[in-house]
Amino acid sequence: MPTFLRSDIITDSDSKLGAIGKGIADFPARLEAALVNDLNRTVVPNLQAGLSYEPPQRKTYKFSTPKSRRWYMWQVGLGNIPTDGKNYKRSHGLSQGYKVTVIANDGAVVLSVRNPAGRAQRFTKGKYQTIGHKINGWIPDAQPINFAAQRARERIPVVASQVVRSMF
């Protein structure tokens, strides 16, 4: 019969499993924080640049309807629309007014884009973009926002793998 000499604990599976369990429990919060940091570094600057693009100003503008042309000329006459005496004078408030934020909240990471320009944004680059703005080269907001959202979704597995590697 063999003689028992010695037994050593090589590894304690309970402590390892406990650490893994804690790591798994911490994973969602770590992923959210890492994803917010990554998106602020990689996606937000490009989105901000895409939204801030202004095409070169042109001298001609095609109005959607005669009524919209009359309204524009009436507003110019009242002094509500700035001009250099002949052409519209840009304030750059629309292109410089975009605020892009990334927020983590209750397990969701949200990419938020806001512009206080409101009415100007709707008709220049938004849902109701006029033919004149389209012809003059204004890119609809949906294009850079959709591209940024797709890029953000592509970053999730990359960031998740980085978080997993940093945990173990």
Image (cartoon, grey):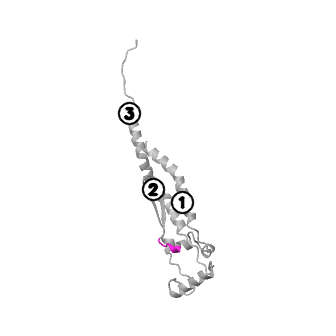
Helix, strand or loop for disc 2:
helix
Residue 67 vs 11, above or below: the answer is below
Toward which corner of the image does residue 143 lie, by quadrant?
A: bottom right
Picture disc at residue 82: none
Q: Position of residue 116 (x, y in %)?
A: 47, 71
Q: Disc 3 marks which residue?
A: 14
Q: Quadrant of the C terminus?
A: top left
Total marks shown come to 3
Name the residue located 53 percent from the left edge and 67 percent from the top edge: 51
Q: Disc 1 marks which residue?
A: 148
Per the rendered image, the range of residues in magenta is: 116-120
Please report contact status of discs 3 and 1: CB closer than 8 Å, yes or no. Answer: no
Q: Nearest the camera: 114 or 92?
A: 114
Q: Position of residue 31 (x, y in %)?
A: 45, 50
Q: Residues within 10 Å of mark 1 (few under 14, many from 20)?
A: many
Dot 2 or dot 1, earlier in sequence: 2
* Three-letter amino acid code of the residue under disc 2: Val
Whole-angstrom CA distance, mark 2 to mark 1, is: 14 Å
What secondary structure prevails in the magenta region? loop
Whole-angstrom CA distance, mark 3 to mark 1, is: 43 Å
Q: Quadrant of the N terminus?
A: top left
Dot 3 or dot 1, earlier in sequence: 3
* Three-letter amino acid code of the residue under disc 3: Asp
Q: Residues within 10 Å of mark 3 (few under 14, many from 20)?
A: few
* Three-letter amino acid code of the residue under disc 1: Ala
Name the residue located 53 percent from the left edge and 72 percent from the top edge: 121
Q: Disc 2 marks which residue?
A: 36
Residue 86 vs 119, above or below: the answer is below
